[in-house]
Image (tube, helix red, strand yellow):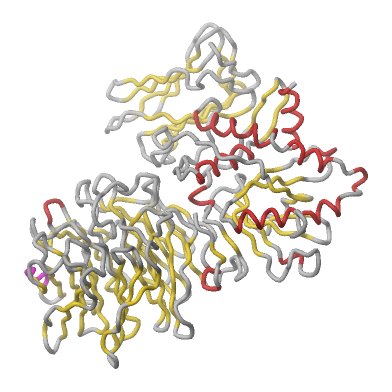
Amino acid sequence: MLGVLLAVVAAVAGLLTAAPAHAAAWDPGSRTISAPKAADWFIYGDHSAATATVSRTADSTDAFWVGLDGAIATASWQAGRGWSAPRNITAPAASTGKGLSVVARNPHHLDVFWVGQGGTVATTWWDAATGWGKPFTVAPAGSASGAATSVVARNPNHLDVFWTSPAGAVSTTWWDVATGWARPFTVAPVGAAAKTATSVVARNPNHLDVFWTSPAGAVSTTWWDAATGWGRPFTISAPGTAAKTAISVVARNPNHLDVFWISPQWAVSHTWWDAAATWAKPFNLAPDWSATDTDGVTAIARNPNHLDVFWINRQGRVATTWWDAATPWGAPFPIPSWARWGISATARTPDRADLFWVDPNGAIGTTTWDEQKPTPGSHARMTSFSPASNGFQFRNDFTTEPIQNLRFGGLCGGMAYSALDYYYTHQPIPQQNILPATGTKLFNQIYSRQVPSITDNVDKWAELMVNPFGWRTNEFFNWGLQGFNGGRLQELQRSIDAGRPVPLGLFKAGNGGAGPHHQVVAIGYDLGRYRGDLGAFKEDLKIFIYDPNHPGQTVTLVPSVADHSYHYLEFPGESWMTYFVDSKYRTTTPLSLLDEPGNQGATPNQLAVTIGTGGDDLRGGSDNANIVVTFTDGRQQFFDNINNGARWIDNYAQTVVLPIYPGNAKVRSVVLSTTGGDNWNVNTLTVKTLAGQMLYQASGNPLVRFTGAHIPYTARIN
């Protein structure tokens, strides 16, 4: 009886912020530009320079990070092209895992610096005419403590690099096009600095200001001027006011400096200097316990009258505040993100900011602020759920057959529930971008959550089916607009206002009540001028959605009063009569699957084998499929029962990810075979690396029919 009920019903089927005006142009979601485990997310000490970024033109951004293997990696963005694939610019073990800095001394040149093995200070460069150069050291072993380097180009033909030594001195060297690299020397004596990052700025071509944290927890500084040389170091905050994390300094005009740091009580602190007024008394921009001890603070000036400051809050989100000459400091708020450490930021135009971090999976996360971009307005309320980092990366293209010959498309409810499970238990969601094959752990996880997403809401689905001749269509539509007396909008607001993303059921009229209906996650809303009173401005309402059918993006559900429906602004053809709030959802602990095949990123030592079953299914149980991979060096690797005993239905393709041996040997062949005595038609077979390189592709009707004779099929790789 339960199976019949499920079949019938299936056919039917962080911190909150009231975003201020400045938050309106932040992306409602974030994305990653690398695979998981691209960066070292278990390094210890000062994590502040785990990423570095620079915009050498208004149409480009270059991001850098230290990989798990100690190599320096990069990806670049260009207008009209988007993000490039990540690549290494050094050999493995080049870096200790931190100390990264980058500068563009002209639009066609980049210089990158890091702390190398043994405490060297190392560098490499890129030039548009020659590409990446060979890395070399500018300070010998034992020079650097391991904390971040900092670099500045005060003119296009000169570089100055700074770091702290193991003995607590602040050291520097410089390069000039006329003389090359100078011998390193100290600008603050032994014992002056804690083993943390330095920060430097050139407020004009003939002046430098350098900042660091002292062992006593004071913010210290010295300066260089072309007319006087190096000044004597002094403190600009009292002892015990600065944690041993990164400091950030910005010169928004030649006569002004702004310095930011984290206090020992994890407040975000600030002071400033002006040529007309000297140093100001430090004060807090964000109160105690706003930040963490795993990262510092970073700041940018997008124009001479504006500052943006970023840090990681205690909920693992990137938080920010801003100052504008026309307004006082804004209230801090979190940006949709999921960050561990390593914030860096750049402003490639006065209207755009790009932000980067290392997320809990070790991937490089990013989001943007764009003043010109239409995003949730000043009335928007958003949770911290980001479809890019908290949603699945594959599209909901599942096909299932829970009852013989009764087939359903999609597992949207299971994907919505599972994504929320990972979010609410603070676990990183699996990162694979390939649809999980039937029988895999991730498929089973999603399918197990699909069942309660339907059965627990039978009453809601059934109620919406009672609509003879469409007489209740207007009533059902208005439920979604009703912000009072238990209306759907009121239920939605209560959840979002409490900082809780919530599942929604989307009901489609017609087709005898059979849909197709849908299940998604509401992550925010914006009333605009609408008051939830069924009065004027109903079409101002926007509900921000994670939809498993649209991975990695936030979609916007809006009402259409004219035809009594709700549709996506981004996909107007996708519409429903109404929605309901799934208040029956309860969090369960999901499987931790980051070490499963497919979640290690697009590495060459993983094969994606796609098998398209034809008109005769693979039964499962004792009738299963096996694969043998043979390499050019003669080694073989055996993968038995790749379907995990599950039935693979007819006329449907399944993809399995195989972790193969690392090394230089290439794949010579992939052999597919079966166990048991059942017949199985395979119509298509595709073999490619997870990085996308096609190795083999064949099709037929069938390509091969397996029988009890157990004759294998061999895919020979050229």
Q: Nearer the viewer, residue 634 or 123?
A: 123
Q: Is residue 494 magenta?
A: no
Above or below residue 6? Residue 511 is below
Residue 606: percent from left, percent from top: 39, 33
Residue 422: percent from left, percent from top: 50, 42
Residue 62: percent from left, percent from top: 35, 62
Position of the C terminus, as image quadrant, is top left
Residue at horizontal 14%, vertical 72%?
A: 174
Q: Which residue is most to the bottom?
A: 276
Asked where in the image residue 238 lies, by quadrant, the reply is: bottom left
Q: Nearer the viewer, residue 140 or 323?
A: 323
How many discs mark residues in the rendered view?
0
Residue at horizontal 72%, vertical 28%?
A: 6
Question: In the rendered view, does 489 fall on the left or right side of 197?
Answer: right
Q: Nearer the viewer, residue 675 or 22?
A: 22
Residue at horizontal 63%, vertical 40%?
A: 412
Question: In the rendered view, does 412 fall on the left or right side of 387?
Answer: right
Q: Which residues are magenta?
A: 180-185
Question: In the rendered view, does 405 fall on the left or right side of 469?
Answer: left
Q: Is residue 497 visible?
A: yes
Q: Is residue 182 magenta?
A: yes
Residue 675: percent from left, percent from top: 50, 11
